[in-house]
């Protein structure tokens, strides 16, 4: 007999398993072709945006001291996803280049849908896995990131973003009034360099050269080269193009999320290159239930920065009194961010209210620069 607590634990975790339904969905849509291929972005972005309005907000918190043994069904999702994603990615490539019913445009649409899957779900799960102490989980995170050619995100996120969020030294903190179409190329340009410098600095503290085998960038490059080779062997040049296309789409999805998470929020400079501690006020949050199921509580972002290794079911919700809140979940807010005038109309007044609430003593906000306090105009 299955213990009752096991059954109840599975029932509580079940809504977070929604993302796994996207695997058979993309397989079915690939066989149908045509307009059916729009089903993947519609199922991730728009379906969950609608479900947010139906299901409402999730304001309750789990006990943050819940032991790992009671989180089996939650952890299982992130452990199952990597092999399923790899099988789906390479299965789609193998199938598409041989499917006579798929035109070039349909293959491009299928590639885009696969990239939405790799970015919305895959990179998000990699983010969860990279923060854990288990070597298996960290390796799965590395493999997921290599499958979208963005391995350095691990170094940038762990060594740069969490340390410098809300300052000009963090490339992925979006500046006030910076539209996404300016943010995206800037981050692509800056984050690789900042992650490399962070790893080199760590090696230097150990008296090691940047070329030392302990530099994870060599592992990153080897894994990425391996994925590129498999894509080429399975699908030739078309397969390689599909792999690159889904990788770019996934990276765009990631950086779109990074863009909205800290837009316009800054930490107070204390002098001497030091900043106030990261607080809940330095991340935008959303308590929308359905999109938190899809994104495994990523929208409880303030608590993630407070306790980076806290597993996703234990992340705590903050009220508007403690942390700034989005009016809608991430699916709607990321779509809004793609239209900068609309985004600024929605968000700039909220940033100004945030400044007045938390930093009324600051009357003049100076422009960002790389090393000093980066409060935006």
Image (cartoon, rainbow, N blue to C red):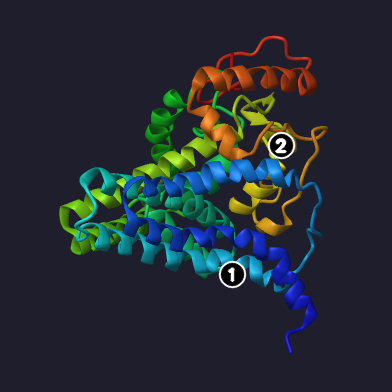
Q: Is residue 232 above or below residue 347?
A: below
Q: Quadrant of the N terminus?
A: bottom right
Q: Residue 145: percent from the left, percent from the top?
A: 42, 54
Q: Which residue is located at x 59 percent, y 28 percent?
A: 263
Q: Which mark is residue 56?
A: none
Camera-side residue of 197 and 58: 58
Q: Residue 333: percent from the left, percent from the top?
A: 58, 33
User: What residue is pinned by disc 2?
Assistant: 277
Mark 2 vs 1, N-terminal side = 1
Q: Residue 292: percent from the left, percent from the top?
A: 65, 49
Q: Which mark is residue 76?
A: 1
Distance between mark 2 and mark 1 Cα atoms: 33 Å
Q: Residue furthest left?
A: 237
Q: Residue 217: percent from the left, percent from the top?
A: 37, 53
Q: Is residue 351 above or below residue 228?
A: above
Q: Secondary structure at mark 1?
A: helix
For the residues carrying marks 2 and 1, which lies nearer the camera in this image? 1
Q: Which residue is located at x 73 percent, y 76 percent?
A: 7
Camera-side residue of 124 and 162: 124
Q: Quadrant of the C terminus?
A: top right
Any part of residue 201 in sight:
no
On the image, which quarter does residue 181 sit in?
A: top left
């Amino acid at each position: 007999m299955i213990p009752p607590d096991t059954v109840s634990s599975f029932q509580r975790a079940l809504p977070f398993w929604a993302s796994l339904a996207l695997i058979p969905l993309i397989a079915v849509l690939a066989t149908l072709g045509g307009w059916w291929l729009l089903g993947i972005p519609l199922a991730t972005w728009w379906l969950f945006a609608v479900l947010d309005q139906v299901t409402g907000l999730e304001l309750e918190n789990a006990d943050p001291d819940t032991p790992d043994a009671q989180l089996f069904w939650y952890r299982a999702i992130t452990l199952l996803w990597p092999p399923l994603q790899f099988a789906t990615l390479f299965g789609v490539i193998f199938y598409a280049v041989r499917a006579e019913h798929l035109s070039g445009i349909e293959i491009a649409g299928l590639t885009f849908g696969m990239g939405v899957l790799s970015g919305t779900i895959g990179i998000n799960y990699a983010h969860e896995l990279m923060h854990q102490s288990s070597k298996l989980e960290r390796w799965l995170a590395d493999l997921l990131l290599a499958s979208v050619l963005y391995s350095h995100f691990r170094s940038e996120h762990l060594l740069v973003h969490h340390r410098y969020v809300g300052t000009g030294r963090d490339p992925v903190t979006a500046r006030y009034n910076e539209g996404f179409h300016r943010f995206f190329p800037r981050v692509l340009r800056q984050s690789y360099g900042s992650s490399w410098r962070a790893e080199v600095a760590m090696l230097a503290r150990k008296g090691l050269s940047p070329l030392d085998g302990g530099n994870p960038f060599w592992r990153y490059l080897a894994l990425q080269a391996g994925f590129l080779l498999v894509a080429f062997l399975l699908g030739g040049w078309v397969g390689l193009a599909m792999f690159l296309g889904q990788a770019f789409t996934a990276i765009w999805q990631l950086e779109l999320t990074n863009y909205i998470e800290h837009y316009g929020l800054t930490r107070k400079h204390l002098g001497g290159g030091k900043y106030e501690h990261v607080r809940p006020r330095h991340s935008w949050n959303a308590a929308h239930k359905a999109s938190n199921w899809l994104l495994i509580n990523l929208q409880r972002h303030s608590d993630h920065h407070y306790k980076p290794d806290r597993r996703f079911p234990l992340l705590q919700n903050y009220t508007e009194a403690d942390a700034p809140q989005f009016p809608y979940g991430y699916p709607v807010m990321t779509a809004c961010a793609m239209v900068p005038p609309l985004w600024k109309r929605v968000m700039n007044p909220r940033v100004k209210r945030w400044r007045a609430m938390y930093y009324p003593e600051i009357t003049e906000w100076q422009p960002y620069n790389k090393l000093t306090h980066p409060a935006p105009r």
